[in-house]
Image (cartoon, grey):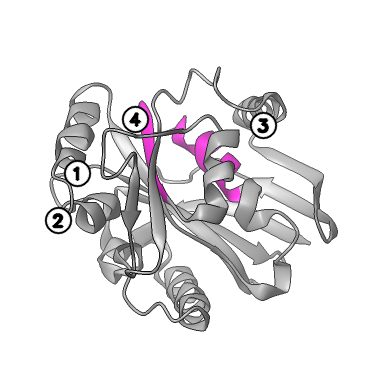
Amino acid sequence: MIQIRTFVAPDEPETCGKFIEGHRKLLEIFGITKITSNRQDWVDDEKTIVIVVEDSETKNVYGGARLQIVSGKYKLPIEIALGRYDEGIFTMVNNDHLNGGTCELCGLWNSREIAGFGVGSYILARVGAVVAAQLPVQSIFVLCAPITVKMGRRVGAVVEATLGNQGLFYYPKDDLVATAMRLRNIYDLSTADEHEREKILALREEPYQIMEEKGPKGSLMVSYNLKVPNLR
């Protein structure tokens, strides 16, 4: 069975290592060798919450994502990625930080073993919205590839059209496009897809669940364990 769980990054350095290696291998398949969210300094950051998709028995990691909370120690990956093109990202992040707190859902990936089951396209974004409600934040930033913009919209994120070219940037390479998006209020899911909103609220209320998830390639039984242990 596939298990999706969370932890504070410094609590599990070995699992963080599996996360980094799996993400790196996937990026290399697409010829991407430099991406800000793949920097490894987050492993020691108590403000980074890791979400992993793993085999419940073997503990093989098949995907994951991170919620990185704004702190005085590290900039968000989206700030590092876009700041040289548009300094407005710094102002936007700082304003959210001062008005309830903010974070970024970043480093989202899934391996080829579970490709097509909706993990990378929908489930991890949903889980990010679920887990964020346990954190001292009001909003979530996310930098989306074209294929994941729909994913962001489903959970209620909107394109930040005041940044870049109507929210678009050439990143991480000149022939690739990324879109800056933000879930402006994690408690107001009025812009989310109704089906996604129901699932997010259900998992927030009961973070320990086993359910069948359906993707383009078929169904997958998923055990959710979304209460963050040892939250600082």
In the picture, measured across the screen, residue 212 lies left or right of residue 168, that is right
Secondary structure beneath dot 3 equals: helix
How many numbered circles does the render carry?
Answer: 4
Quadrant that contains the C terminus? top left
Which amino acid, by three-letter code, is at mark 2?
A: Arg
> In the rendering, at what x and y percent does residue 82 appear?
23, 53
> In the rendering, at what x and y percent does residue 96 appear?
25, 28
> If you read the primary sequence from the N terminus, does the residue marked by circle 2 or circle 4 appear first?
2
Tell me the crowding category of disc 4: few under 14, some 14 to 19, or many 20 or more residues within 10 angstroms, Cα based.
many
Secondary structure beneath dot 4 equals: loop
In the picture, measured across the screen, residue 87 lies left or right of residue 21, that is left
Residue at the far right in the pictured view:
218
Q: CA distance from mark 1 to mark 4?
A: 11 Å
> In the rendering, at what x and y percent does residue 136 appear?
33, 30
Residue nearest the viewer, comparing 46 with 65: 65
Q: Which mark is residue 84?
A: 2
Please, is residue 79 above or below residue 227 in the view? below
Span colored in magenta? 124-143
Q: Which mark is residue 137?
A: 4
> If you read the primary sequence from the N terminus, does the residue marked by circle 3 or circle 1 appear first?
1
> If you read the primary sequence from the N terminus, does the residue marked by circle 2 or circle 3 appear first?
2
